[in-house]
Structure formats: C-alpha cells, structure tokens
Image (tube, rainbow, N blue to C red):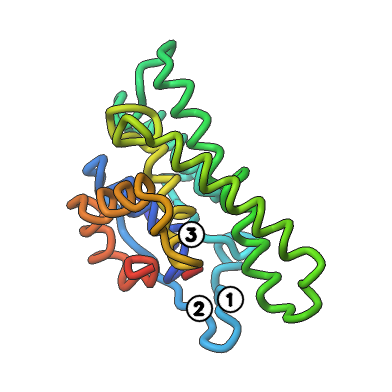
Amino acid sequence: MPIEVHHLANSRSHRILWLLEELGLPYTVVRYERDPQTQLAPPELKKIHPLGKSPVIRDGDLLLAESGAIVEYMLQHHGYGRLVPPVGTDDHVRYLHWLHFAEGSAMLILVLKLYLGRLGDAAAPLAPRVDGQIADHLAYMETSLAGHDWFAGDDFTAADIMMSFPVEAAFRRGGLEHFPNLARFLKAVQTRPAYRRALDKGGPYIYDRQND
C-alpha cells in the first residue's frame, strides 16, 4: 500500500515528498490549500491530526506528524541505509546535528522573525536581537559548508533535505548574497531530479522561487 502524505501547500511537507522521491517509494498526496486571507492550514487537517499539522504520513496503521520524526521513521523502515552516513563516523554525528538543527534552531528563529514582522512597531524592542540571532545562524551554516558540498560531508543525506527549508526561508527573507556556500547549496538541492519531481506531485511551491 502506498504511503499517504497529507501535504499543505507551500509548507515544510514538500521535504517529505522530496524524501520519498529520493528513496523511490510509492506514495499518494492528499493536498490541502491555505486560507487565502490568513495563510493558515484549513480545518480539514484537524480531522487527520488534532493540531492540524502538516506534514502527516499514513503508513499502514501508523499515523505520524513532525518532519524530523517522519524522516527518521522513513529512513529506519524504508531507507535500507540510504541517505544516512554510516553509524560511528564523524559524518554520522554531523548528520544527526543538522537533521535536528533544521527545526530545533534554524526554523525557530526564522518563524519568530515572521511573527514579529506582523506586529509592526510593537516588535521594535525584540527585532535587533532576533536579527542578530538569524545572522549568527546563517554564518554558522555558511561556515559548515566550507570545503564540502553537503551539511554532513561530501555525500548528500537526509540532513540536507531537512536543512533545505531554513535555507530557502533565509533566501526569501533577504537573499544569500553574503553566503555563497548557502547559495550554492540551495541551487544544488533545487536542481536535484527528485526535488523537481516532488514539485510536480505536490504542486507549486513558492519557496521554489522561495514563503512560509
């Protein structure tokens, strides 16, 4: 039975479609559109997950949310060693770091910036600190790519799939002209055939030209 992906337009769930394409696994897409005024997920998603989250996958009797958890589950149960460096290597340690850095650190501050942008002048006291944190994160990410193509080392891994979204979000926020390694990374991921196939199946993705 194909894996079922509950996919919200213009969201992080694009990464799950991309992962499935990289692994060559059969899947079906249940697509949800954002409210045109609020840009929030539709209430129909709460019928699938109590928090109305996306992505959500259904694999047999299993229903699972959270991008990082889905990636780990898919690789453990369907990856057969693909897209993960060998356990015990330095690359595997880096892989684990960036796999979880994507949501645990990078997206946290970028989402905070997004919400502050909707507060207008009320956000002024906090904005410099948030901007400074974003700059620090981007510099750290930029440095990590010096000397090799991918976040975990010389080979493409699922950590790169997870990291694609914060890099795309940073591009949308202000460009990457001061971060050539991140710009190179972004071009490399967006031209991967599996990335493009995921776009074909999931529908237009504003971050392909880069939105939250």
Residue under circle 3? 170
How far, Cα to Cα, is label 1 from label 3? 20 Å
Q: Image point 48% across, 36% down: which residue?
A: 99
Compare marks 2 and 3 and give the one earlier in the sequence.
2
Relative image position of residue 124 (x, y in whole percent): 77, 72
Residue under circle 1? 40
Horizontal relation, residue 201 to residue 166: left or right: left
Does dot 1 land on a helix, a strand or a loop? Answer: loop
| Residue 13 falls in image quadrant | bottom left
Compare marks 1 and 3 and give the one earlier in the sequence.
1
Tell me the crowding category of disc 2: few under 14, some 14 to 19, or many 20 or more residues within 10 angstroms, Cα based. Answer: some
User: Which one is nearer the viewer's eye here, 30 or 140?
Assistant: 140
How far, Cα to Cα, is label 1 from label 2? 5 Å
Does dot 2 land on a helix, a strand or a loop? Answer: loop
Res 73 label: none
Furthest-front residue in view?
A: 178
Q: Image point 60% across, 76% down: which residue?
A: 43
For the residues bearing labels 1 and 2, Cβ distance under 8 angstroms: yes
Whether 157 is drawn above or below 108: the answer is: above
Furthest-bottom residue in view?
A: 37
- Residue type at the position of mark 3: Ala
Relative image position of residue 164 (x, y in whole percent): 40, 50
| Residue 46 falls in image quadrant | bottom right
Tell me the crowding category of disc 1: few under 14, some 14 to 19, or many 20 or more residues within 10 angstroms, Cα based. Answer: few
Residue mark closest to the camera, 2 vs 3: 3
- Residue type at the position of mark 2: Arg
Does dot 3 land on a helix, a strand or a loop? Answer: helix
Relative image position of residue 128 (x, y in whole percent): 72, 62
Q: Image point 45% across, 67% down: which residue?
A: 172
How far, Cα to Cα, is label 2 from label 3? 21 Å
For the residues bearing labels 1 and 3, Cβ distance under 8 angstroms: no
